[in-house]
Image: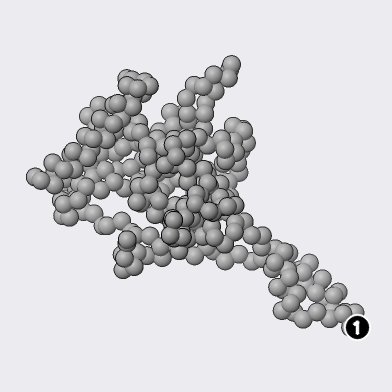
């Protein structure tokens, strides 16, 4: 359980004016109150307009407390060892079901892709375009909401079209705290790539999300409800590593993606070997 002293509250969403067409509203107010006996109290009228102008996108139970634990500050001199890791989370895996939509008696709540898409449309989140190889996650090409929607429409994608997510994370050993730590750097929803005859060619990222910039947003939306009724946010779901995924690539001496040298069961075995090597490295450094 993370203590409140080690958490910080997420930022509030920017306030939006619900009455966008001010002149038209004022004209309607004057017209409504000009007839004798038909005057409407200003407060009641504004409340009615607010209810019409502010649609409820999700049920109240979809929210979370908005708190998250900030990353511990790091000095470069304290990083004794570091590796950059790309891993793929398959939504078909029951451990990753919350990526499609929240689990545990949270009906009507948005899944992660719809949440990211809506936030980008509203200007609350910046998403970035991938390169042709899909690994251009250096956040060099921000996408406008229009560009994002054009790409999604061109690919014919919906929430159920997202079958995988790619994570980029930094594994590092902090000698000041004698701690091995994995920090998520980026997220990318992935869709199937089909050939001209409909055959499956692979999976490709649609866009990239800078994870540290999105933590406040993800901390305010529930990913699951525990058996005791507590709602766990998407940020907490990632922070507590409820997901399950296979390592796709490790930036090291060879810097090669696993599928380039092996496929199927061989790729899975190599992925598990990389995971064990990362964990073993943390143990060795801690003892050293």
Q: Looking at the picture, tell me which residue is in the foreground, 199 or 174.
A: 199
Q: Give the class, few, some or many, for how many residues have Cα within 10 Å of label 1's Cα (few <14, many ≥20).
A: few
Disc 1 element: loop
Q: Which of the image's four quarters has the C terminus?
A: top left
Q: Residue at x 52, y 37 (%)?
A: 162
Left or right: residue 166 compared with residue 72: right
In the current view of this chain or complex, which residue is farthest to the front? 227
In the current view of this chain or complex, which residue is farthest to the bottom? 37
Position in image of residue 70 (x %, y %)? 33, 59
Q: Residue at x 35, y 36 (%)?
A: 86
In the current view of this chain or complex, which residue is farthest to the top? 197
In this rendering, the answer to whether 193 lies above or below 149 is above
Left or right: residue 161 compared with residue 137: right
Q: Looking at the picture, tell me which residue is in the foreground, 287 or 133.
A: 287
Left or right: residue 54 compared with residue 32: left
Look at the image and tell me whether residue 89 can be seen.
yes
Q: Residue at x 56, y 50 (%)?
A: 110
Look at the image and tell me whether residue 131 can be seen.
no
Position in image of residue 60 (x %, y %)? 57, 62
Left or right: residue 74 compared with residue 261: left
Quarter of the view holding residue 39: bottom right
Q: Which of the image's four quarters has the N terminus?
A: bottom left
In this rendering, the answer to whether 36 lies above or below 220 is below
Q: Looking at the picture, tell me which residue is in the foreground, 108 or 10.
A: 108
Q: Residue at x 60, y 64 (%)?
A: 16
Q: Name the residue that disc number 1 marks.
A: 36
């Amino acid at each position: 359980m993370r203590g409140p002293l080690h958490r910080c509250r997420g930022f509030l969403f920017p306030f939006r004016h619900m009455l966008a067409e001010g002149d038209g509203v004022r004209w309607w107010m004057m017209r409504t109150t000009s007839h004798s006996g038909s005057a409407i109290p200003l407060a009641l009228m504004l409340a009615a307009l607010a209810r019409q102008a502010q649609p409820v996108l999700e049920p109240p139970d979809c929210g979370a407390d908005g708190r998250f634990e900030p990353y511990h500050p790091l000095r470069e001199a304290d990083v004794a060892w570091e590796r950059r890791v790309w891993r793929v989370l398959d939504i078909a895996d029951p451990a990753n079901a919350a990526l499609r939509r929240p689990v545990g008696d949270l009906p009507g709540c948005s899944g992660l892709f719809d949440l990211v898409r809506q936030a980008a449309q509203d200007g609350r989140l910046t998403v970035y375009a991938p390169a042709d190889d899909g690994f251009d996650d250096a956040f060099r090409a921000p996408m406008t909401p229009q560009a994002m929607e054009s790409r999604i429409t061109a690919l014919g994608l919906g929430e159920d079209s997202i079958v995988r997510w790619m994570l980029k994370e930094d594994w590092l050993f902090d000698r000041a705290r004698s701690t091995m730590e994995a920090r998520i750097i980026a997220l990318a929803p992935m869709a199937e790539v089909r050939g001209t005859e409909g055959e499956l060619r692979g999976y490709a990222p649609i866009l990239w999300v800078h994870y540290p910039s999105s933590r406040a947003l993800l901390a305010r939306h529930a990913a699951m409800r525990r058996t005791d009724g507590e709602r766990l946010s998407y940020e907490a779901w990632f922070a507590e590593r409820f997901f399950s995924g296979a390592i796709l690539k490790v930036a090291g001496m060879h810097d090669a993606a696993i599928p380039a040298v092996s496929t199927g069961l061989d790729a899975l075995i190599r992925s598990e070997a990389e995971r064990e090597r990362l964990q073993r490295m943390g143990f060795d450094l801690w003892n050293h």
